[in-house]
Image: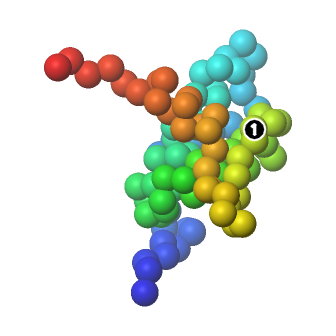
Amino acid sequence: LKFTPRLDAIQLPLEIPATPPAGSQAQHRDNSTRGLYRFFVEQCDLAQNEAEVRVAKIGNDFWDWKLQFDAGGDGVKKGCDAIRKHLARHQPQTDT
């Protein structure tokens, strides 16, 4: 059996306003993308490709992002290239 967290017991890692403050569209999208993705992967134990699709669906529905994604099936790999690339581009820099 897979653990399914109760919705009322889950706390999102950050508050995401329905509409971004004026002039902060890029920052809102970055915070929303990273926050939702981390929530789905870390709190809900979803696979990364499933988290990408869910973030894209939420962004498209709530913020009109117009992202393309593959929901899987018929030999198509599930995922969202735009979310994956955004996360890779905006990785925190670490000193090595």
The amino acid sitting under disc 1 is: Leu
| Crowd class of label 1 (few under 14; some 14 to 19; many from 20; radius 10 Å) | some
- Outermost top residue: 23
For the question of whether residue 52 can be seen, the reply is yes
Q: Residue at x 52, y 46 (%)?
A: 37
- Outermost front residue: 75
Residue 92, image x, y percentages: 37, 24
Image colouring = rainbow
Q: Residue at x 70, y 52 (%)?
A: 70
Which quadrant would residue 33 be assigned to in this image?
A: top right
Residue 69, image x, y percentages: 71, 47
Q: Nearer the viewer, residue 76 or 26?
A: 76
Q: Quadrant of the C terminus?
A: top left
- Outermost left residue: 96
- The residue that disc 1 covers is 67
Which quadrant would residue 59 be assigned to in this image?
A: top right
Q: Quadrant of the N terminus?
A: bottom left
Q: Residue at x 43, y 59 (%)?
A: 43
Residue 93, image x, y percentages: 32, 20
Q: Is residue 12 left or right of residue 81?
A: left
